[in-house]
Amino acid sequence: MRSRDLLERSLKAVWHPCTQMKAHERFPLVPIERGRGAWLYDFDGRRYLDAVSSWWVNVLGHAHPRINAALREQLERLEHVMLAGFTHEPVVELSERLGSLTGLGHCFYASDGASAVEIALKMSFHYWRNRGRPQKRRYVALAGGYHGETLGALAVTDVPLFRDAYAALLRPGDTVPSPDWRAVEPGESALEHAIRRASDLESHLEKNHGETAALIVEPLVQCAAGMAMYHPEYLRRARQLCEHYEVHLIADEIAVGCGRTGTFLACDQAPVLPDFLCLSKGLSGGYLPLSVVLTTERVYQAFYDDEPARGFLHSHSYTGNPLACRAALATLAVFEEERVLERNRVTARALTDKARGIASHPRARHWRNTGMIWAFDVDTQDPSFARRFQAAALERELLLRPLGRTVYFMPPYVIGTAEIELLVDRTVALLDELA
Ligand SMILES: Cc1ncc(COP(=O)(O)O)c(C=O)c1O
């Protein structure tokens, strides 16, 4: 029983993330030995369909042969070198590639999503300071938004469960109402709702733009808020308003970038070009910690100076790690050569067609889809619904992790027809049984 043994050792030695450890008395950890494609396997021959892409990072499936090969090759040449004062091939190639994919540049790297958000927030403030406007030091974010859990990122996050315990440590931030279309008024379309919410943003910026450095948004889908989806018109108007009121637009595409919403960037659907773009998660194919902030020439030039303190003196030890950059380059090569975005359109249609039984289920509300994300809210009063659903899903070979009452699918893009059928049929059975 290697699974049982590992589980017990893990509970003694590892403090697991985002977990009340006592809950594992009732809901056991799941030891995983290996992964392949959309599946994870434990030590005892059980398998789980990774319908949440291992916290939304795995885009091309586990143990992808091309990413594995690229990493093996890189490993023989250079595993790591500091990026201050040095450079290397993978980081240069990746930066050039990301520049041409996004229309932005000057890639600044870190390891995780929260660090990328910290970088964008700091760079925005520092830009205004270098431009002689140090009073621009506030940030505005969308209600329900999530941007990570380090103190700066948490200050622009609006999820009480993660925030409340640390409220005394956080700089006060501003929030404006979310354009989440579930909150439409009777008779109002998602587009009209987005326009109304953009006018709330306008009122806020009109009053506060003199002190506001940046607006930070998760474009199109606020994932941690329960896959709250909104019309791209909101982004288009937000971009115009930010331009008009001289406020930066930070697009946090850590969860929604790399094809997740149907286009390479969610911003492409507006289309808008932000002042700062944060990418992570799927960027390395879900293999290695890697995040990046891209920005504009205008921002870069505000730091370019003889005076060291006008530069951006921020660093992380593993910034631009060659292995992580190589994994990202292999991921982007697969995107292009195997036409991943086109293939995803076919996969998305198949899943949406198959899922009609969920959309019309008497317990399901607000069935929604953007690209390779599907979600619905469950009509239940059970406060432990998420836990119970997750445990019952595992018994049916599904890795699903509801956010409160919201069940969502965010599978690796390699999910096939048989797996889609299994996912949907078993989710319907879970709904019949548990909701
Ligand atoms: C939109 C968004 N921003 C930032 C983060 C934080 O990323 P990380 O967990 O890598 O710090 C997340 C993580 O889920 C996210 O969804």
Image: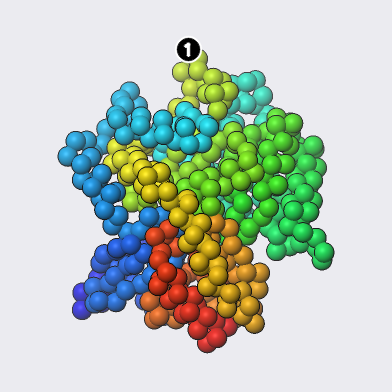
Please identify the quarter of the rendering in which residue 152 is found: top right
Q: Judge by depth and name the residue closer to the eye, 145 or 429.
A: 429
Please identify the quarter of the rendering in which residue 32 is found: bottom left
Q: Judge by depth and name the residue closer to the eye, 343 or 203.
A: 343
Task: Kindly give the residue lying farthest to the bottom in the view shown.
Answer: 433
Secondary-structure class at tag 1: loop
Quarter of the rendering occupied by the N terminus = bottom left
- Compared across the picture, whether 331 is left or right of 271 comes to left
Q: Is residue 149 visible to us here?
A: no
Where residue 299 sits: x, y (%)?
Answer: 56, 25
Q: Is residue 319 visible to us here?
A: yes
Where residue 219 sits: x, y (%)?
Answer: 60, 48
Indicate whether 333 appears above or below 11.
Answer: above
Q: Residues within 10 Å of mark 1 (few under 14, many from 20)?
A: few
Where residue 391 sits: x, y (%)?
Answer: 43, 78
Instruction: Tell me what residue is drawn at x 48 percent, y 36 percent.
Output: 101
Please identify the quarter of the rendering in which residue 216 is found: top right
Q: How many marks?
A: 1
Indicate whether 200 appears above or below 361.
Answer: above
Instruction: Tell me what residue is drawn at x 21 percent, y 74 percent.
Output: 2
Where residue 352 sits: x, y (%)?
Answer: 55, 67
The residue wearing badge 1 is 306
